[in-house]
Amino acid sequence: ARKIVLSEDPALPVAKKIRIRDSTDNRGARVKVSGWVHRLRVQGKDMMFVVLRDGSGYIQCVLTGRQCHTYDALTLSVESTVTIHGTIKVVPEGKSAPGGHELVADYWAVLGKAPGGDDAFGSKLNAESSPDILLDQRHLVIRGETASSVLRVRALLLKGFRDFFDSRHLTEVTPPLMVQTQVEGGSTLFEFDYYGEKAYLTQSSQLYLETCLASIGDVYCLTESFRAERSHTRRHLSEFTHCEVELAFIAFDDLLDMMEDMVVSVIGSIMSHPVGSKIVAELNPNFKVPKKPFRRMNYVDAIAWLREHGIKKDVKDENDVKIGEADFEFGDDIPEGPERRMTDTIGEPILLCRFPAEVKSFYMKKCPEDRRLTESVDLLMPGVGEVVGGSMRISDLDELFEGYKREGIDPTPYYWFTDQRKYGTCEHGGFGLGVERLLAWLLDRYTVREVCLYPRFMGRCQP
Ligand code: 4AD
């Protein structure tokens, strides 16, 4: 058989290189588009439909006649890269395509051929692939429509945070991730060897943010935190993106207002974005933007609620094996399961406030009206539970030393943090929001693993 070779017709106008996102503006003009073959459908011997993807969008391309007869056409497979030249035309009446138009090709060429057969893209994963296979192949999964949509909303969310903080005059900082102090308890620290010294991956940048108040005022950071979480849950990662805020000269109510304003504002920014709102509608059609003010509930009332609703705590033996159940009592930490059942039953965001000092971190300020409690808060969302944790911080030097002592922390490496109470203390507070948890809630994903580019949790550190 004679080898069929395509060539571009020199009589045609020069094709203008465009991105798919600009297709509508270029209808009628001769263009060239490069991208990955997202879908492929062969219709008879003389027609092929290629849905092309270039990261900016999707466009249907129609190849006809000789364009379908080349070796490349006969062996074309999805995920190959191609450049297609032609004219963007509105689709004929009764037909549909992304954007309402299609690229009618007059010439095309392969740039990088993807394998067919046993090694074809489609045989690596499909709808039935197990979660483990999907995670092994995450670098390919992110080419899919759902995963890429999630990544897009993630980017919009990060931008939403920055825009909101900018509007409130908070300054962004990038604290170190390699540290020698803990923030949230020794049990979840990732330890490593730092030139012969013991160091950790940061659990939270909070203490560093606190040092910035006296320098540049109210601050925030959007950076990674690390936790050696040894249990597999739907909402725990070993590495997560932590949005943390610290504000000076505020009272507890100001902190609660700020949390509420931030969540409503960033969600609002996604919902008012054409791409963001479209993706949320696709992935979470029942989503409703939460309204201010959020329900505010005290820890003691949550304990009463759990008792009234017959939600029990597990009683465990010294080996952490469940041996029975009992009613919740004041002083108990409310674990993930009961907390979720309460939040899901109430069915709206809850600002859960004033936890007992024993179940919270060393730095939290006590309530003036009841010294057993702290000015602390967790924001709970239906479907995921806790997405934000925050508090007012201890402002008194002696109280801080008591906090170190209660938690068995050696104050020596915290000298720089202690100095904040020595050189001009102030009432201040802040919070940390888990970006993945907010996203899982917004996009109705089963686990936080689905909203990471490459999730990290126990047993997974690749790709
Ligand atoms: O409640 P946490 O531990 O609070 C702090 O770290 C404070 N120092 C923050 C601050 O006040 N600046 O964590 C805050 C939030 C949680 O509400 C949760 O959303 C998220 O961080 N988070 C995790 N997300 C995913 N995986 C984990 N292992 C997480 N641990 C905490």
Image (cartoon, rainbow, N blue to C red):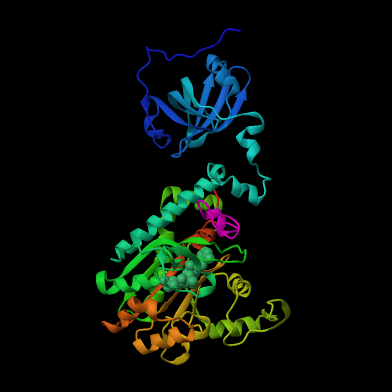
327 with respect to 13 (left or right): right
Which residue is found at the position 30% from the left and 66% from the top?
A: 170
Which residue is found at the position 42% from the left and 48% from the top?
A: 274
Magenta-drawn stretch contains 455:
yes
Residue 285 in sight from this viewpoint: no
Residue 73 coordinates in the image, percent (x, y):
56, 21
Q: Nearer the viewer, residue 78 or 133?
A: 133
419 with respect to 291 (left or right): left
Name the outermost residue toward the top: 2
Q: Nearer the viewer, residue 89 or 216?
A: 216
Residue 6 coordinates in the image, percent (x, y):
48, 14
Q: Relative to 152, is 311 above or below?
A: below
Which residue is found at the position 31% from the left and 79% from the top?
A: 420
Q: Which residues are magenta?
A: 445-461
Q: Relative to 234, is 94 above or below?
A: above
Residue 106 coordinates in the image, percent (x, y):
46, 18
Magenta-drawn stretch contains 117:
no
Q: Relative to 156, is 222 above or below?
A: below
459 with respect to 156 (left or right): right
Quadrant showing the N terminus = top right
Residue 414 coordinates in the image, percent (x, y):
38, 77
Residue 438 in sight from this viewpoint: yes
> What type of secondary structure mainly makes up the magenta span?
loop
